[in-house]
Image: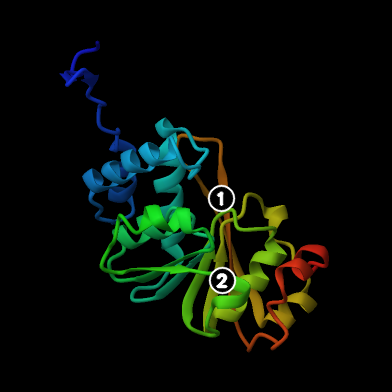
Amino acid sequence: MTPGQESIRGYPQVPPMDTSALQAYCTQHGLSIDCELVSDFGESLYEANRVTNLTRVPESDFIVRHVIDSLLVQEFIQVGSTVLDIGSGPGLPAWPVALARTDLEVTALDSSGKMLGFLRQWPLPNLIILEGRAEADLPRSKYDVVTGRAVAPLAIQLELSAPAAKLGGAVVPFRSSREDIQVSEKSLGHLGLELESTHVRDVPSTDITRVFPVFRKVSKTDSGFPRPWGKMRTNPLT
C-alpha cells in the first residue's frame, strides 16, 4: 500500500483526482470552478462506468480529456446565453460548462436514458436535462448557442443543430481538424447558416487539437430540415 492509502474495511482509499491542470486552466481563462465537485463527479462517473458503458476515456485522463476539453467551447459563448449540448452523453460538455459558467442556461440533450440517468445524479441550478432525439424532439429557434462533442459527421451535426439555434445565434461544433469543417454554401443556405470564423485550440498536455467553427444563424432553417435520421445518414448534405 502506497503512502496516503489507508485501508477502510479492507478496501484501499482511492487518492483524489489531480485537478491541478484544471485549476491552472481556469486561472488562465478567468474561470472559477469547484474542483472538489469535479473530482467527485469524475469518481462517480468511473464507478458507474464499471457496470454501464459511459465513457472510453481512461480515468487518469478525465480532467484533461473530458473536463478541460469540454471547457474549451465556453470561450465562444457570450454572457447570459442559452446553450444546447446535442449528444451530451453523461454530461460532456454540458456539465463542466454549466459548472464553470453560472451565467449560462445549459441544456444537455441525449437519447440514451442510461447516460442521462447518471447525469441526473449531478444536478446544477443552471443545467436542464432533456431526453430525446435532436431530429425529432427539439423546439426550433430557441437557443443562443448549439454545440456538441463527437455527435456525427459535420454535415449531420449542422443539420441537427441549425433548426434549434435562434436567428442571430450560433452553432459551434467540436471538430478535430480544419479539413473537418467543409460544407457547401448551398447546404449552409438550406440550414440558414454562414461560417463566421474558425478557432483552433489545443487540449493541454495532449496531442489533441480542437477546431471550433462558428456558424452564425443568419436566416431561418428550411422547414424540411432536419430530415429523419436515416435520410441524413444515407444522403448527407455536402
* Residue 37 to residue 97: above or below: above
Three-letter amino acid code at the position of disc 2: Val
Residue 132 seen in the figure: yes
In the rendered structure, find residue 234 and report the number of the disc placed on it: none
Q: State left or right for residue 165 relative to residue 158.
A: left
- Image quarter of residue 93: bottom left
x and y, in percent, of residue 115 in the image: 46, 54
Q: State left or right for residue 101 relative to residue 205.
A: left
Quarter that holds the N terminus: top left
Distance CA(mark 1)–CA(mark 2):
15 Å
Disc 2 designates what residue? 171
Q: Residue at x 47, y 59 (%)?
A: 113
Q: Residues within 10 Å of mark 1 (few under 14, many from 20)?
A: some
Residue 93 seen in the figure: no
Q: Residue at x 50, y 35 (%)?
A: 206
- The way the protein has been coloured in the rendering is rainbow
Q: Comparing marks 1 and 2, which lies closer to the viewer?
A: 2
Q: Residue at x 49, y 55 (%)?
A: 89
- Image quarter of residue 164: bottom right
x and y, in percent, of residue 77 in the image: 43, 69
Three-letter amino acid code at the position of disc 1: Arg
Disc 1 designates what residue? 210
The one nearer the camera, 113 or 110, is: 113
Disc 1 secondary structure class: strand
* Residue 192 to residue 203: above or below: below
x and y, in percent, of residue 25 in the image: 34, 46
Quarter that holds the C terminus: bottom right
For marks 1 and 2 on the same chain, the one whose residue lies earlier in the sequence: 2
The one nearer the camera, 76 or 66, is: 66
Disc 2 secondary structure class: strand
